[in-house]
């Protein structure tokens, strides 16, 4: 079957109810459609309006009427039971124009994010494939510290993950650390922290968020030696070359994702380090781009949140 403009398409099947509770409006006629689609055709309603409405609170109604276990199915007779709001066509089009504007801004923001990510990747490639500079052992760059907490809850409990450093309460929405955290390692601003078991996956992070905190004794905490730019080192430690090196000095542990880090071999890993001025140039550029990327992600989250709020409030 070929589409008509203003059609609304909803999948007939999926692995979960959430997979199929997604409606989209067709903007062009003549598109050849597959057989695994519910096609809703409207003469006197705005298809885009219906699509937005079905992607709001109505998606939960769609999920409820879907049937199946391993594969969930949604049939036309199920859709007939879904109640929708039908204001005047002019009002529908006003709502569509507003939500479309937000969608356009989200799309633009996604392009901005892709640009920043591409630029950061390009700078990281400079680090990855750089051949100039002085060969330096990692043990001369990272100086291990083992400062410990002396009282319970002396500082905020932090977690190091593949995605970065987070407050444990922020990341898990609760405290999961031992009730007694005396003896936890203290991490300060500009320190580096890593997990010896998950280092090869990228669990090594530069702390540029928290003035001070405590982490599990199983972590390793380092300060960065004088003569090295912090931002440059932070980026260098996350390159693909670095991750490959970490894997080579880690042995298979109790599970597939856990490897035991050989700390002596880790400290002997060699990196090419350019002059301090060059380090600062690269580090500053990466830091600026990461800051702009962080802001861009906040903006797109705000737009997405605004859209979801409107979808829920407009179609009660």
Image: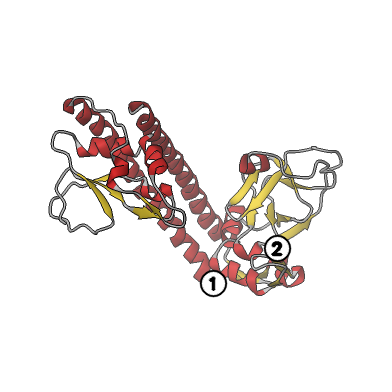
Which corner quadrant of the image does residue 270 belong to? Answer: bottom right
Q: Coloring scheme of the render?
A: secondary structure
Instruction: Where is residue 184? Give x, y as percent.
Output: 80, 47
User: What is the residue that sits farthest to the front in this orientation?
Assistant: 77
Is tag 1's residue or tag 2's residue first in the polypeptide sequence?
1
Instruction: Where is residue 37? Give x, y as percent.
Output: 27, 53
| Mark carried by residue 132 | 1
Which corner quadrant of the image does residue 304 belong to? Answer: top left
Does residue 102 show up?
Answer: no
The reply, left or right, for residue 206 in relation to residue 57 is right
Quadrant (top left/top right/bottom left/bottom right) for the C terminus: top left
Instruction: Where is residue 88? Give x, y as percent.
Output: 19, 25
Residue 102 vertical placement versus 39 (above, below):
above
Q: Which residue is drawn at 48% across and 65% down?
A: 126
Instruction: Where is residue 168? Give x, y as percent.
Output: 67, 43
Which corner quadrant of the image does residue 314 belong to? Answer: top left
Q: Nearer the viewer, residue 258 or 250?
A: 258
The residue under label 2 is 197
């Amino acid at each position: 079957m070929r589409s008509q403009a203003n059609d609304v398409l909803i999948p007939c099947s999926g692995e979960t109810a959430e997979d199929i509770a997604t409606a989209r409006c067709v903007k062009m006629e003549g598109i050849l459609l597959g057989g695994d689609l519910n096609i809703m055709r409207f003469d006197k309603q705005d298809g885009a309006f219906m699509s937005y409405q079905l992607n709001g609170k109505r998606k939960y109604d769609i999920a409820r009427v879907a049937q199946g276990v391993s594969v969930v199915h949604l049939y036309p007779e199920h859709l007939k039971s879904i109640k929708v709001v039908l204001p005047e066509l002019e009002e529908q089009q006003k709502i569509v124009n507003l939500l479309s504007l937000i969608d356009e801004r989200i799309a633009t923001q996604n392009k901005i994010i892709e640009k920043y990510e591409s630029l950061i990747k390009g700078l990281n490639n400079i680090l990855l494939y750089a051949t100039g500079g002085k060969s330096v052992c990692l043990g001369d760059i990272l100086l291990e510290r083992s400062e410990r907490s002396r009282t319970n809850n002396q500082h905020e409990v932090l977690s190091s993950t593949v995605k970065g450093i987070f407050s444990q309460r922020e990341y898990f929405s609760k405290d999961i650390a031992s009730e007694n955290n005396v003896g936890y390692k203290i991490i300060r601003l500009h320190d580096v922290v890593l997990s010896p078991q998950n280092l090869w996956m990228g669990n090594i992070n530069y702390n540029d968020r928290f003035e001070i905190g405590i982490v599990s004794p199983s972590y390793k905490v380092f300060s960065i030696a004088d003569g090295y730019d912090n931002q440059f080192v932070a980026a260098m430690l996350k390159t693909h070359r670095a991750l490959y090196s970490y894997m080579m000095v880690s042995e298979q542990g109790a599970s597939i994702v856990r490897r035991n880090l050989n700390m002596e071999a880790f400290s002997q890993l060699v990196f090419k380090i350019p002059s301090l001025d060059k380090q600062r140039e690269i580090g500053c550029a990466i830091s600026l781009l990461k800051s702009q990327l962080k802001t861009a992600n906040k903006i797109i989250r705000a737009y997405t949140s605004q859209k979801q709020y409107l979808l829920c409030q407009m179609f009660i």
